[in-house]
Amino acid sequence: MERFEDVISAIQRDMLEICMEYSDYRAEHIFIMAFWQGEKLTCRHFYCVGGKVVRHSDLNQAGAGQFDVSPEIQVNCNMILLEDMRNLAETCKRYNKPIPSQMKIHYDVGRQKAEMGFQYDSKYGLFAGKKIDNEFNAWFTEASQAYGTA
């Protein structure tokens, strides 16, 4: 049987790979934030491209050329990320590990270094969507200050 850590790492690599493909392999940094609320999954991603931190739908505003951010491409990327999240949850169940309520991945492409963090508290109850938006926006602002302009 594969080690739990190896399976989780493979899932996270797949998430990063689809985001690299989405950004046409031009991102300097990739940021992925995933939330589990029971059976509800939410995943958001944004990028630093050309020294500018932008949301996934705003890649063309980074000043680094044109990207295909068509609705079809956005949906396809999100569907793959959500499938990876389901696989991660199933892996946790299979190995009798707790399913995180939140996962953050920051990948520094130039250094080929990923930082990952998990939270296991269930702070996403009533008004979960607003809390998720607030956390995502806070991380986006933090990344903008650290890696480029928003």
Image: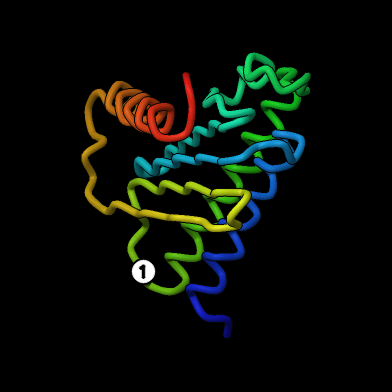
> In this orientation, which residue lies closer to the viewer: 145 or 130?
145
Label 1: how many Cα within 10 Å (few below 14, some 14–19, many 20+): few
27 sits to left or right of 87? right
Query: Looking at the image, which residue is at 57% across and 85% down?
Result: 1
As displayed, is residue 120 above or below residue 72? Answer: below
Q: Residue 138 placed where, x, y %?
A: 32, 28
38 sits to left or right of 61? left
98 sits to left or right of 26? left
- On the image, which quarter does residue 141 sit in? top left
Residue, far top: 61
Q: Residue 132 placed where, x, y %?
A: 34, 29
Query: Looking at the image, which residue is at 69% across and 17% down?
Result: 60
Residue type (three-letter) at the residue carrying disc 1: Lys
Q: Say which residue label 1 marks.
A: 97
Query: Looking at the image, which residue is at 41% across and 33% down?
Result: 143
> In this orientation, which residue lies closer to the viewer: 9 or 138?
138
Element type at mark 1: loop
- Tally of marks: 1
Colour scheme: rainbow
Q: Residue 27 placed where, x, y %?
A: 65, 37
Q: Residue 106 placed where, x, y %?
A: 48, 47
147 sits to left or right of 27? left
Query: Looking at the image, which residue is at 21% across and 39% down?
Result: 123
Residue, far bottom: 1
- On the image, which quarter does residue 49 sit in? top right
